[in-house]
Image (cartoon, helix red, strand yellow):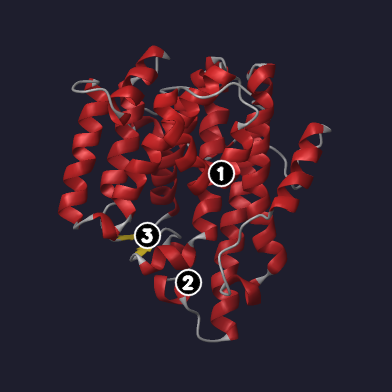
């Protein structure tokens, strides 16, 4: 593989440490796509940490720094750096500012405590912090505009998987992304006190992962819109993320609260081999049209396409 631009070598290290699944997948991107994907990941990770990590300052200070990061990326003004470089790269790829704005605004809204009441709130959040990243990745990997709804769906599916995996960690940060209308609360999800509560909480996690599988299934129909040189990387990323959710399901309720689930090197290697053989790791889930059925009401959200580009 060709080396990364020296300015971005440290960014690759960041991705290798914090995004082990995506780092594996990024190996299969073309050189130019990989450099831009690494830059986008490092920017998104920096912004996400400012929203989440209390060790980085008070809520007010972290929000201030997020606003600075947002302005630098949107205006591509000031000294060259992570935000300006990312904004310039996205402009070069023709990504509308509204998409980046929606991403940053969603993180700004997430910088405090959080308790979603409805499934629609969860979807809006998942689009803002992850569906937008799918949109931004589309031109980076050379996908046509027709891939946009599938890229958004893949980002949302991955975010739902992240939420399902990180319930305990999120609760410790006073965040509960599983909607209250599902009849669960942060306390029960974080530390169920008996078998009944464990089953109730795990049922919500199962529901979330079943929902994410529908998004992965829909997204897989768009893989053909990605150029061959970069298609395998996206298939691998989707496969590894979905496999995390399936591992949670296999381990069951009794094991869930014993520690955060991740994939080992052997599991990733097996999944990569399956991808190489053209066997996408997925449940037998029909590709429900989530664009029409779940996401149509998001047309008022900044950055969300006014219509299905297909």
Quadrant placement of the C terminus:
top right
Residue 239 picture location, percent across and down: 68, 42
Which quadrant would the N terminus be assigned to in this image?
Answer: top right
Q: Secondary structure at mark 1?
A: helix
Q: Nearer the viewer, mark 3 or mark 2?
A: 2
Q: Which numbered disc covers residue 104?
A: none
Residue 49 locus on image (x, y percent): 34, 49
**Residue 132: horizontal and vertical position, in percent?**
42, 33
Say few, some or many: other residues with alpha carbon within 10 Å of mark 2 (under 14 / 14 to 19 / 20 or more): many
Q: CA distance from mark 3 to mark 2?
A: 15 Å
Judging depth in this view, the residue of 223 and 308 nearest the camera is 223
Estimate the spatial distance between the alpha carbons at disc 1 and disc 2, rounded to whole Å. Answer: 20 Å
Q: Secondary structure at mark 2?
A: helix
Looking at the image, residue 180 sits to the left or right of residue 293; the answer is left
**Separation of marks 3 and 1 at Cα, in angstroms:** 20 Å
| Pointer 3 with pointer 2, Cβ within 8 A | no
Above/below status of 164 relative to 198: above
Residue 113 or residue 119, whichever sits in front? 113
Classify 173 as above or below 277: below
The mark nearer the N terminus, 3 or 1, is 3
Residue 282 image point, x, y percent: 74, 44
The residue at which mark 1 appears reads as: 157
Q: Is 79 on the left or on the right of 125, as rendered?
A: left
Quadrant of the rendered structure where residue 94 is?
Answer: top left
Residue at position x 38%, y 19% in the image? 89
> Quick check: 96 above or below 300?
above
Q: Nearer the viewer, residue 157 or 34?
A: 34
Residue at numbered disc 3: 117
Q: Residues within 10 Å of mark 3 (few under 14, many from 20)?
A: some
Disc on res. 189: 2
């Amino acid at each position: 593989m060709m080396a990364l631009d020296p300015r971005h070598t440290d960014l690759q290290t960041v991705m290798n440490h914090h995004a082990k699944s995506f780092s594996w997948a990024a190996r299969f991107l073309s050189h130019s796509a990989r450099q831009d994907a690494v830059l986008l990941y490092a920017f998104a990770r920096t912004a996400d940490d400012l929203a989440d990590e209390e060790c980085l300052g008070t809520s007010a200070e972290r929000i201030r720094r997020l606003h600075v990061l947002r302005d630098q990326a949107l205006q591509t003004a000031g000294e060259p750096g992570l935000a300006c470089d990312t904004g310039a790269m996205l402009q070069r790829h023709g990504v509308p500012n509204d998409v980046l704005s929606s991403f940053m605004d969603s993180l700004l809204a997430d910088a405090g405590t959080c308790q979603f009441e409805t499934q629609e709130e969860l979807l809006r959040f998942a689009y803002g912090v992850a569906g937008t990243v799918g949109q931004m990745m589309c031109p980076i990997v050379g996908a046509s505009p027709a891939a946009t709804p599938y890229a958004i769906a893949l980002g949302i599916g991955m975010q739902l998987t992240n939420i399902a995996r990180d319930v305990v960690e999120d609760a410790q940060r006073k965040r509960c992304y599983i909607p209250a209308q599902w009849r669960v609360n942060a306390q029960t999800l974080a530390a169920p006190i008996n078998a009944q509560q464990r089953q109730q909480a795990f049922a919500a996690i199962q529901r979330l992962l079943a929902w994410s599988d529908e998004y992965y299934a829909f997204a897989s129909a768009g893989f053909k819109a990605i150029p061959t040189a970069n298609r395998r990387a996206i298939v691998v990323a989707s496969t590894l993320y979905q496999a995390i959710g399936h591992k949670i399901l296999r381990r069951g309720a009794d094991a869930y609260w014993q520690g955060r689930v991740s994939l080992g090197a052997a599991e990733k290697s097996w999944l990569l081999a399956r991808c190489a053989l053209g066997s996408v790791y997925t449940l037998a889930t029909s590709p429900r049209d989530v664009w029409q059925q779940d996401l149509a009401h998001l047309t008022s959200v900044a950055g969300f396409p006014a219509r299905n580009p297909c």
